[in-house]
Amino acid sequence: MSRALRTRALLASLLLIPASALAGCASSADDKDGGSGKAPEGFPYTVTNCGVKTTFEKPPERAVTMNQNTTEIMLALGLQDRMAGTAFLDDKIVPEYRKAYDKVKVLAKEYPSKETLLGANPDFVYGAYPSAFEKGEGRERPALQDSGVNTRLATESCAKGRVGVPQLQKEIREVARTFGVPERAEKLIEKQDRQLAATAERLKGAEKTRVFVYDSGDNAAFTAGGKGIGNEIIERAGAENVFSSVDKPFGDVSWEKVVEKNPDTIVIYDYRGTSLAKKKKRLLNDPALKDVPAIKHKRFAVMPLSSVVVGPRVPDAVDELARQLHPESYEQGRAK
């Protein structure tokens, strides 16, 4: 068909389209700004996150989450419809979020390459750890910003002070505000507060136990320090972290120091890599630890790593760790 004939055919087809349909197309194009040309309510929104100041003219529509806890924060806020992709799980998604998660495209088993990431056409990337924005991989925050992609790093990775429930709540509020749904944050936080209060009530009168967290390590022990939310989870679960004096979320300590601290219980962080069975075997077979009460009496508690970082699992983590450390508080049916 010649160009002239194609042009006539196109004009004829347009004449057959009802005016109401054309009006509908125009109105749908205006829906995002309410048809007024103005920014959505609550925008522009400016936030400074881990030293990066970002102004959002409108809520992100194609977010990519990197790491488990950031993915679960998005799902807890009901934002799966704004997710263009996700990557890097340490363990299974919480059952209550599984259905929503299954609707999101998995870009990579671990971190995606820059090409794969940008291939998802994101307008926002949300990572839990600095490794999500690895410079050597081309995913650094300035480079993504130059590509028109806004970013956020979970604040536990850059906090100067202690990270606890207040910082978790700030994280939830800022993410919800970024996506224009602040009311969802308040609803989630109210639920978390009720659960934390219920666990605290159960533990009234329970004697604190001294715990050492074993994340990994052979020549030295990689453990939870006093700056991360893991430390507060331990405290709220009715225990004392023997390495709370370590001035960061995680850090290496010598095995001699572990022996010196003489913990009553060892909390093992479980995630892919070294298996839980191998971690227990390493601890039980170390002759230097044989007189440590936790080893002597084989007192272990186990927590998934994704439950002891900033994310929506924290209240569940407090309750689960308390249940393992103080089963009597649950068996006796104390106030719920």
Image (tube, rainbow, N blue to C red):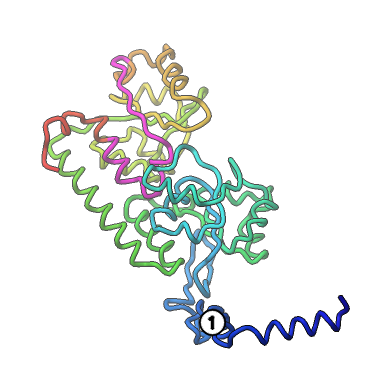
Question: Which residue is at 17% across, 33% downward?
Answer: 330
Foreground residue among 214 and 2:
2
Quarter-of-image position of residue 225: top left
Tell me where residue 121 appears, x and y as whole percent: 63, 60
Foreground residue among 288 and 121:
121
Foreground residue among 314 and 263:
314
Q: Where the C terminus falls, by quadrant?
A: top left
The residue under label 1 is 24
Count of picture labels? 1
Question: Which residue is at 34% across, 17% downward?
Answer: 295
Foreground residue among 90 and 164:
90
Residue type for callout 1: Gly
Quarter-of-image position of residue 167: bottom left
Q: Is residue 140 left or right of residue 156?
A: right
Residue 3 lies in the magenta-colored region: no
Question: Which residue is at 43% across, 61% downward?
Answer: 175
Q: In the figure, 141 relative to 55: above or below?
A: above
Q: In the figure, 180 relative to 284: above or below?
A: below
Residue 309 lies in the magenta-colored region: yes
Question: Which residue is at 34% across, 50% downward?
Answer: 164
- SS under mark 1: helix
Which span of residues is magenta-colored?
296-321
Q: In the figure, 150 relative to 68: above or below?
A: below
Tell me where residue 119 appears, x and y as whole percent: 67, 56
Tell me where residue 271 appears, x and y as whole percent: 47, 33
Q: Where the N terminus falls, by quadrant?
A: bottom right
Tell me where residue 235 appears, x and y as whole percent: 27, 40
> Which residue is farthest right?
2
Q: In the figure, 17 relative to 221: above or below?
A: below
Report crowding for label 1: few under 14, some 14 to 19, many 20 or more residues within 10 A (C-alpha). few
